[in-house]
Image (cartoon, rainbow, N blue to C red):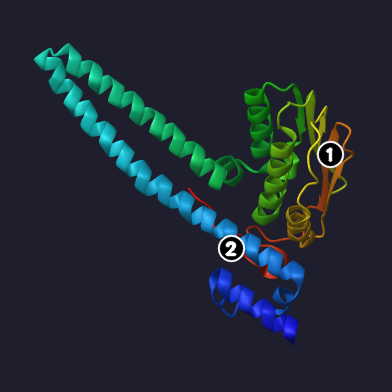
Amino acid sequence: MVRQSWLSRLRRFVGGARDSEVENQDAQTDGGLATWLQSTQENERAALARRLHDELGGLLTAARMDLSWLRARLDQLGDEGMRQKAAAIDSGLSEAMNLKRGVVDRLRPALLDHFGLATALQAHCEDACRRAGVPYDVQVAEEISEMPPDLALALFRASEFALQRMLKEPMPKHVELIAELEEGQLLLTLQGTGVAPAPPLESLAIENFQHWIGRYGGRLAWEDDGGGSAKLSADAPLGGFSAGEGPSGSRSAPTAH
């Protein structure tokens, strides 16, 4: 009774009382609470991504349209100094648009929502390694995208987290990502060699991913020998879920368009 009361107070603190659909027996366990917290965070990220995309994106687009009108008038006046100033403002707005896209994508990966896990994993790993100047090998089977959106998000977030850990100074010598389908089972391995020694990975973060993926009958493990090799391994059965639903009919987090 004391433990349940503590969990109830914590749930009210982080987000208020939930509706009757989410208040079930699963939420009375540590794993259920971790999953609920993760789902709440992803919902908030998706809502913020939508707002940045729609509202901030609209404001920046309108500003560029107004600036285009102004530059046309400045061309008629022939004021070279004003034209250069307008060009500088246009460049700044372009940078702001690119920054907005990057922030929105970090909050809610558009490639994951629109093209699936295979495309999102490959693009993220290649882009991150390319920017870091780290050699990489990526082998991702397109078939792995056939899964519930919530499971795809869990696997993407876990891989994103592990890759961020690997790509720390000094940079690793090589990163390899393999995701394949074998007898209806997704097998995912993300491994870095020559990884710099680092403090132990936060166990709570790994446990949260394990609970999240475990809801679908999957498993996740992190190995770091402290001697230059780090590996994230995950497997999960594909199939048996309705599109857009998780285990027990729970809905996945809304997407940002």
- Judging by the rendered image, the residue that carries numbered circle 2 is 40
Position of residue 219 in the picture relative to residue 164 (left or right)? right
Amino acid at dot 2: Thr
Label annotation for residue 231: 1
Residue 177, compared with residue 254, is above or below; it is above
* Spot occupied by residue 106 in the image (x, y as percentages of width and height): 56, 43
Amino acid at dot 1: Lys
Q: Is residue 227 in view?
A: yes
**What is the spatial separation of the Cα atoms under label 2 and label 1, in whole angstroms?**
28 Å
* Spot occupied by residue 175 in the image (x, y as percentages of width and height): 78, 29
Residue 233, compared with residue 178, is above or below; it is below
* Corner quadrant of residue 144: top right
Q: Residue at x 82, y 47 (%)?
A: 234
Position of residue 166 in the picture relative to residue 82 (left or right)? right
Q: Which residue is drawn at 57% across and 73% down?
A: 13
Position of residue 31 in the picture relative to residue 19 (left or right)? right
